[in-house]
Image (tube, grey):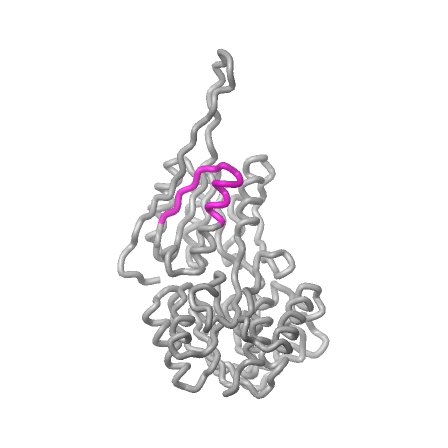
Amino acid sequence: MRLARMVALALTVAFVVAACGGTSTTPPSKKLKVAFIWVDPVNGSGWTLQWDRARQDLETKLGVETVAVGPIAESADVIPVYEDLIRKGNKMIFATAFGYQPFTTQEAKKHPDVKFIGIGPNTQAPLPNVSTVYGNLWEARYATGVAAGLMTKTNKIGFVVAHTIPSVVAGVNGFALGVQSVNPKATVKISVTNTWYDPPKETEAANSLIQANADVTAQHEDSTATLLASAAAKIYSIGSEADTHNIAPAAYLTGTYYDWSKYAQDQVTALQNGTWKADDYSGDLESGLIAVGPLNSLVPADVAAKFQQAIADLKSGKIKVFTGPIYDNTGKLRIPSGTTWTTIDIYTKTNFFVKGVDGKVSQ
């Protein structure tokens, strides 16, 4: 990710240990140090905002000492950052960008006593001190697609996409399948920015879709640029990464977001009690790691009812997003009737957009 500059943020908390009483000479216990590496700024980025909320919860709920550094590019620039954090005694590092994975692997081999948490799905050889986490975003996207499909009047929906990697494409496909479940005439046109965070570029992409007659937009981007561009055009938009309904209440139709707090607390607690084990985890709607934001209050009651039913059916497993028959946008059958893809299938086989999506996956 290219940014104009890298800004280091030090977010630390003070700690005072109360004496045990009497003349005890027991030394005060040392706080566990946990670090976070941001790929984009907290302000203006839903992705990093949600991770920062998890960081704050670690301090207030578990009493650990945290530090956050960023934005740091998804490149070798992150290696000296790791080294500095480890030198300062951080025993767990959350590297909150998918592109950090190969550099995390390098550092994890050099520092086996430090635990690393990266963004999945994991593309590296497994190591005993590296975990990854991500969410089954396609579930939440499907529900928001239901809302978009019911609210569009032009039957043209725009989607601003950061990268056409499997985890992102799966979300777009889930969204499109949700749209088609209630409105087979609607199409989803994508615009790819090739960056996670570049508000001007995302604004330009959103505006191009709006000019192409999209009257609802969606996004898989870290900033709120698509939402704000849609608000300026007085159309609905689907938020992403964080609950951003308060940023543009009139434009926000609904959205998807992550809740990393419980996961982060579970990881730290396991480290503290000696039960931590490396894992590649993908949370779903039922687990709460991913969630759907509030629905705009102006949405008709029948739309709201279908939207809420979709969420309930996704949580219960009645709706399994990638169950065949599913065709790609060239007409090729990708998932046969009676077949349901597993999470691993979704992460490893999603190299196409489904029928109804106007766009191509970069190979």
Q: Residue at x 40, y 43 (%)?
A: 67
Q: Is residue 67 magenta?
A: yes
Q: Residue at x 48, y 20 (%)?
A: 19
- Residue placed furthest toward the left: 4
- Residue placed furthest toward the top: 23
Which image quadrant: the C terminus? bottom left
Q: How many marks?
A: 0
Q: Position of residue 254 (x, y in %)?
A: 53, 69
Q: Is residue 135 magenta?
A: no
Q: Residue at x 56, y 72 (%)?
A: 144
Residue 139 sits in which quadrant? bottom right
Where 250 sits versus 81, above or below?
A: below
Residue 231 sits in which quadrant? bottom left
Q: Position of residue 302 (x, y in %)?
A: 64, 78
Where 90 sits versus 213, above or below?
A: above
Q: Position of residue 237 (x, y in %)?
A: 47, 74
Q: Position of residue 299 (x, y in %)?
A: 56, 76
Q: Residue at x 43, y 41 (%)?
A: 66
Relative to residue 283, is residue 360 drawn left or right?
Answer: left
Residue 206 sits in which quadrant? bottom left
Q: Which residues are magenta?
A: 54-69
**Can residue 170 be seen in the rendering of this structure?**
no
Where 317 sits versus 150, above or below?
A: above
The residue closer to the viewer here, 58 or 118, is: 58
Where 12 sits versus 154, above or below?
A: above
